[in-house]
Structures are given as C-alpha cells and as structure tokens.
Amino acid sequence: MLSKVRAAKQNYRGYKRQCKAIIIEKEKRNDLLRESEPGDLSVIQKEEDEKYAELSTKLIELDHELNEANQNLFKLKCQYDANPSQLEKTQYQKRFVELYNHMSSILREIKGLYNMYNMNIDIRNFTKKEIDLLNNIDDLKDKAVQESYKDSFIKNLETILKSIETSLDKLSTKKEELQKRKYKNDDELQLLVDKQRVYSNALAEFQAECLINQELHGKLKK
C-alpha cells in the first residue's frame, strides 16, 4: 500500500511539471493571438476548450485518489483499534503520518489545480474579449476611412479603451489579492514544515524507546 502511495506522489510531481508547461504554452498562444488572422482564432479557441476539459478530468481523478487514501486510512485505523502490540502501534503510527502527509499533498495539488483552472477561465474570457475587439476593428476598418464615420469611430475606440482599462484594473486588484494570499500560505506552510520536523524527531526518539521497552519486556517474560 505504501508503494502505491509513493507511486501516486511521483504521478503528482509529473503532473505538476505538466501544468507548468501548459501555462507556458498558453502564454505563447496569447502572444500569437495578436498576430493571428480571424479564421485562425476559432481553431485556437477549440484547442483551449479541449485543454480545459482535460484539466477537469484530471481534477476528478485526483478526487478519486483522495477518496482511496481516506479508505486506506480508515482500514489502518480499524487495524490500530484491534489492540496491537506496542511495536505494531509504533508502525501504525508511522503509517498514519505517511498517509496524512500524502493526503495533505493531494489537497495542495487539488487546490493548486483549481486555482490554475480559475486563472485559465479568466485568461480565456480576456482572450475572447480581445478576439471580439479585433473582429470589430476588422469589420469597421473600411468605414473608418469615411469622413462621416471618423468621429463615431473615435468614440467607439475610446469606449473600448475605457472597457479595457477597467478590465486591467480588476485583474490588477485580483493579482494583488492572490499575491497576498500566496505570502500568507507560504508563511503557514513554513510553520507546518517546522512543526513536522519537530514531530518527526520526537517520533524517531519515541520509536527507539519503544524498541528498548519491547526488548526489556521480552526479557522479563523469560
């Protein structure tokens, strides 16, 4: 069972690297959107939708794996309640810690994927607005050269510019909020790491004392 847990951790690390690669690819695609023809934009949009579907499927798989880890934890608890020896209790306690750390890792991965998913939704919405803007400009470029339409065209551009500035302000505010949340999470993570280090040292000392106690108990029986 523990080997499955370790294999799952490796899968998460690989998927995390894959997610980083997807983000880099999306940034490149956003740069290409400004240079693409209107006919190419629908193809790119379709590819983006497929990636969203793939990400949602991966989130469901992670939920299933978390449920499986919970079931394994429940089985270990039942075994622990069967009144095992002190040495077995120590081994079960160690497995509890490993499973707890594994579940915490899964929860962090799920939270990161949900944040990435929400970020991709924002990027897609912003990209869609940009596509609509480019299409509108392309549709109006012939009318823009007409003298009677110039004033109206300029007003439309000013309206579009204000809309873009409003969107940028919202995104900047959201970025600042996410940055503050990130700093807070980093501090909490460091605190948990320190506590885990202290706990691991105490657990190692406790296990050593349990082994000594088990040996002495065996000698007394003899």
Image: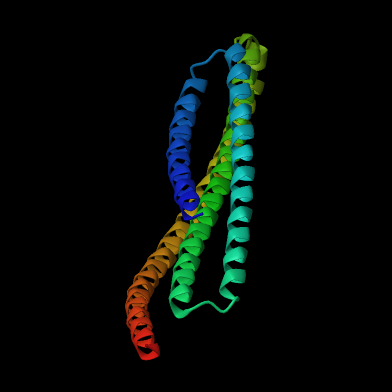
Quadrant occupied by the C terminus: bottom left
| Residue 52: x %, y % from top left | 61, 34
Colour style of the rendered protein structure: rainbow
Q: Is residue 152 left or right of residue 192?
A: right
Q: Residue at x 46, y 31 (%)?
A: 27
Left or right: 100 as drawn, with respect to 50:
left
Q: Position of residue 9 (x, y in %)?
A: 46, 49
Q: Is residue 168 above or below residue 132?
A: below
Q: Is residue 194 visible?
A: yes
Most foreground residue, 52 or 155 = 52
The answer to whether 100 is drawn above or below residue 25 in the figure is below
* Foreground pick, 176 / 208: 208
**Picture residue at 58% right of the left edge, 63% below the top:** 73
Whether residue 154 can be seen here: no
Residue 216 in the image, given as x and y percentages of width and height: 34, 87
| Left or right of residue 182, residue 213 in this image | left
Name of the residue lying farthest toward the front: 222
Q: How many marks?
A: 0
Q: Observer-nearest residue: 113 or 106?
A: 106
Question: What residue is drawn where x is 53% and y is 59%?
Answer: 103
Depicted 81 relative to depicted 4: above or below: below
Which quadrant of the view contains residue 214?
Answer: bottom left
